[in-house]
Amino acid sequence: MVGLANPDKRLISLAQGDPTVFGHLLPPGSAVEEVSSAFGAYTYNGYTASAGAPSARAAVAARYSVPDRPALNVDDVFMTVGCSEALSHAIAALAIDKANVLLPRPGFPLYETLCNRHGVEYKFYDLDGDNGWEIDLEHVERLRDEDTVAIIVNNPSNPCGAVYSEQHLRAICATCEALRLPIIADEVYEDVAFDVDRPFIPVASFSGRVPVMSVSALSKRWLAPGWRVGWLVMHDYNRILATAGVQLAINNLCQVSLGPPTPIQAAIPGIFEADEGEWLEGTLEVLRKASSSCLERCARVRGLSVPSEPQGAMYVLVRMQADAFGGDDETFTDVEFAKRLLAEESVLVLPGTCFHAPGYLRIVITVPEDELEEAWNRLEVFCERHSRERKLTDSPKELHVLNGKVEAALKIVDSDKKLFAE
Ligand SMILES: *Cc1c(COP(=O)(O)O)cnc(C)c1O
């Protein structure tokens, strides 16, 4: 979609949503050991139950049980091929005639793909970029109609990097309760929260009578997207979904792919029990640093800003000031900006348009420090080159350029002096 890179410059991708591509972020060693020993045992080479191995389902049920709520059991859990299949099952199970689902904007494009695949209509509710990308709940109220079967809530969020506060999660649940609106909670970035004062909290903690289907996977929190193991958890304490046949439908849908790989399911209890706090803190520290270096660099580039700093997940959503970049009589859209950046500087970022956020750029922060530094150097040069208001500034960068000029002038004076001396 974005085109070709400059053949004379090494490509740096700030676009891929796979945290493992650079090799500096790896799954916990304990998880790798659990999986290796499952393979080594030679007893997990066959099929297991389509809805998931009982030991894996039990481990998920225990991990995701919510305080002050009945404990989850094996039947509330379905093991899936990544979080993607869990989302697919959740949407497909609600796909009655004329059904529509409310999706976040900006949001993860897979939601639409899955709705289209299952013949479910969708409408977008807005997230507020100037307010931590919180959900515009009045917009949700206006959008909900008699065919609305669910709302997808993504927290921590891709591409926004938001981590919702307890207060906002309670407000979301209150709105959904008033609207009788089940929640599909995409919590695949669980625990990927940078600030100890703003931890990840599952939305099911405050859901009251609202049924919640929460989905997650080993993909992001455990940095192993290639292992393709995820799960769907039904927080259906009033048996609203079960009565409507949703649980049965999901159970039937699990018979299609026959579930994720058996050896990795076998490793799940061990992966959850492992003491990997230090590993998680190390991962978060890398992401925190990358996030703040992006914020720092972005602050120095005229025309770019970050309206709400990332609080978690693996992305920074950067806002392009309207009319800031382009030529004499054209301004760049986010798509043009991304195309040109790739063609000229071989830096790949995704235009916000991919996430229904025109005028934004998504930058991944799962990139090593030196690569990120180099990418921002190129971004800065690019933005300078295409700035439409280059002259009107007193930014430190301009000072730098000015200093360069002063230095050059001094050199000329110097060489003049030499000339005269000779
Ligand atoms: C990566 C991602 C997924 C998909 O996860 P898989 O487990 O790889 O299928 C789902 N939702 C969001 C928001 C993601 O970023």
Image (spheres, rainbow, N blue to C red):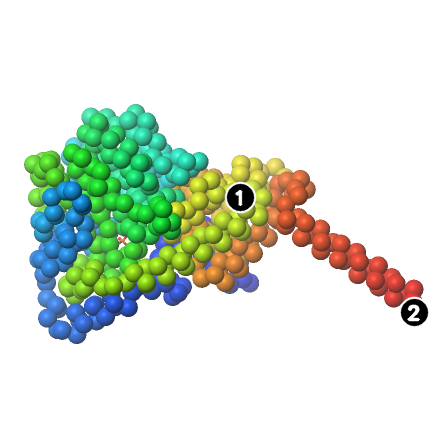
Type of the residue with mark 1: Leu
Circle 1: element type: strand
Residue at the image point whose x is 88% and y is 63% from the top: 417
Residue at the image point whose x is 45% and y is 56% from the top: 289
Task: List x then y, in percent, for residue 396.
Answer: 64, 49
Q: Which of these two is toward me, 331 or 165?
A: 165
Task: List x then y, in percent, for residue 302.
Answer: 58, 44
Q: Which of these two is toward me, 50 or 410?
A: 410
Looking at the image, tell me whether mark 2 or mark 1 is earlier in sequence order: 1
Q: Which mark is residue 313?
A: none
Write down the quadrant of residue 325 in the picture. top right
Circle 2: element type: loop
Asked if the residue at label 2 sits under 8 Å from ligand 1, the reply is no
Quadrant that contains the C terminus: bottom right
Type of the residue with mark 2: Glu
Q: Is residue 223 above or below residue 155?
A: below
Q: Are marks 2 and 1 in contact (CB under 8 Å)?
A: no
